[in-house]
Image: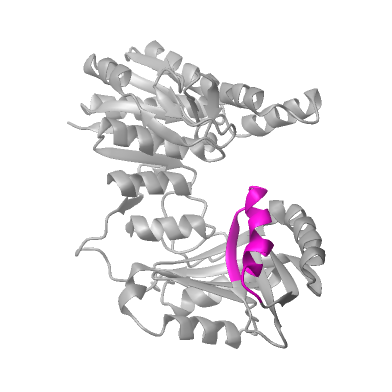
């Protein structure tokens, strides 16, 4: 029998009844002869409530203390699940992040895992104990509690699976797998049996919310098979694995949509060496991630530079660019936080022509104007007006043959 790492998200442990359901599922896996490590998120809504409490305590909570506070959510669910398993006569022990030796850097609120000392977990597993680990957290080299950012329990699970060389990492959530697009947008979306690490990385970075992107990076780096499945059914979900010759050869595997983007354009930027750095370095220094970047062709000694950022960073980025524009003598700064990014993703795009033309033709047929375009080997993204996003997703889903078959 194998070693299975099972991760359960916030909706899966939202209340005592759901934690009890998780306990039964974990016990069943243990009864099948597997060694089991369970990674838990906080109960749904708990992290948000803790953030609100911190805001009531002070306008500017200190980051180290925020991590100490937020880590209590996962500590609660880990202890409750271990209690339930023990009451069901199963040997279980809970571990916090530092006890599981999840070592991170000191970037409070968004720490990165440096390594995992798996000796304690291995010792418990050798005694056939079910190991229950609080996800989303670790500790830095000074012993301070750190957290991994939103969705960090996914990263905890895959990283621990890699450290233990687990046979499988099961990610249990409120959806039953990875779909060709968001079923809430397109009723004809269908579940994929398999998806490659590359495709999942692109989907996660382009708006799909099934898996946290850092968890997919870990899975790809350490070749950890990931099974995305529902906490509320026994159905098989979607396997996230390396590409192999037996996989379905779809040119496009999925359509993603992100409504968390904003677009900033600096018009009339002097066309001279180093100007792009002057425009974009201050954004980076402010800790803001820039996604798409487009620079127009020079005209009359100037050009335009446009880029996208997360909508949460929009106001800060806009203020920075308005200041920079004055310093470099640019004409104007324009901003728009009513845009969306729609993308087509698929490893089959590497060896097939015509994907871009079909995408652009499909959007044109729906009178959807494209504001920006970016591409990689396996994706094409277009920034469009947000009000057309769902229409664009449905049209592209049909155009690329991803709709469910009739009958």
Which quadrant of the figure has residue 132? top left
Magenta span of residues:
272-293
Residue located 46% across and 49% down the image = 213
Left or right: 22 with respect to 339?
left
Q: Is residue 368 above or below residue 405?
A: below
Nearer-the-camera pick, 152 or 80: 152
Q: Is residue 147 left or right of residue 371?
A: left
Horizontal and vertical percent position of residue 17: 52, 26
> Residue furthest toward the left?
1
Q: Find residue 89 and report its image quarter.
A: top left
- Is 30 situated left or right of 42 in this image? left
Residue 392 seen in this snapshot: yes
Residue 292 among magenta residues: yes
x then y, percent, for residue 324: 76, 62
Tell me if residue 234 is in the magenta stretch: no
Residue 226 percent across, percent down from the top left = 33, 45
Q: Residue at x 41, y 51 (%)?
A: 177
Q: Is residue 178 above or below residue 84?
A: below
Tell which of 193 and 314 is nearer to you.
314
Answer above or below: position of 151 versus 263: above
Q: Quadrant of the C terminus?
A: bottom left
- Decide if residue 8 is in sight here: no
* Residue pictured at 51% horizontal, 76% vertical: 396
Q: How many marks?
A: 0
The residue at the point 75 percent across, 75 percent down is: 267
């Amino acid at each position: 029998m194998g070693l299975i790492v099972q991760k359960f998200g916030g909706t899966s442990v939202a209340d005592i009844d759901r934690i009890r359901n998780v306990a039964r599922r974990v016990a069943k896996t243990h009864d099948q002869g597997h060694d089991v490590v369970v990674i838990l998120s906080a109960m749904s809504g708990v992290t948000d409530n803790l953030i609100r409490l911190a805001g009531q305590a002070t306008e500017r909570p200190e980051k180290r203390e925020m991590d100490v506070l937020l880590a209590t959510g996962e500590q609660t669910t880990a202890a409750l699940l271990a209690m339930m398993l023990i009451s069901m006569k199963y040997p279980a022990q809970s571990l916090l992040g530092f006890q599981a030796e999840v070592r991170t850097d000191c970037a409070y609120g968004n720490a990165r895992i440096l390594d995992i000392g798996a000796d304690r977990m291995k010792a418990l597993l050798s005694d056939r104990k079910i190991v229950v680990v609080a996800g989303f957290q670790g500790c830095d080299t000074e012993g301070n509690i750190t957290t991994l950012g939103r969705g960090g329990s996914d990263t905890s699970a895959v990283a621990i699976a890699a450290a233990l060389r687990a046979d499988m990492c099961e990610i249990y959530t409120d959806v039953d797998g990875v779909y060709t697009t968001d079923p809430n947008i397109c009723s004809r979306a269908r579940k994929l049996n398999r998806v490659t690490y590359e495709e999942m990385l692109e989907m996660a970075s382009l708006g799909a919310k099934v898996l946290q992107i850092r968890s997919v990076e870990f899975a790809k780096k350490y070749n950890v098979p990931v099974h995305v499945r529902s906490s509320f059914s026994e159905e098989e979900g979607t396997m996230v694995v390396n590409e192999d010759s037996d996989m379905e050869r779809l040119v496009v595997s999925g359509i993603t949509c992100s409504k968390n983007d904003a677009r900033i354009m600096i018009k009339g930027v002097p066309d001279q060496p180093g100007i792009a750095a002057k425009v974009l370095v201050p954004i980076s220094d402010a800790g803001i991630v820039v996604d798409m970047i487009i620079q127009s062709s020079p005209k009359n000694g100037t050009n335009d530079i446009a880029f996208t950022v997360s909508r949460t960073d929009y106001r800060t980025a806009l203020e920075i660019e308005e200041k920079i524009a004055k310093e470099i003598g640019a004409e104007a700064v324009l901003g728009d936080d009513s845009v969306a990014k729609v993308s087509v993703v698929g490893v089959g795009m590497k060896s097939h022509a015509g994907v871009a033309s079909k995408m652009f033709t499909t959007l044109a047929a729906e009178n959807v104007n494209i504001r920006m375009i970016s591409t990689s080997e396996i994706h094409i993204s277009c920034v469009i007006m947000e009000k057309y996003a769902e229409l664009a997703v449905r049209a592209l889903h049909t155009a690329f043959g991803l709709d469910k078959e009739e009958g």
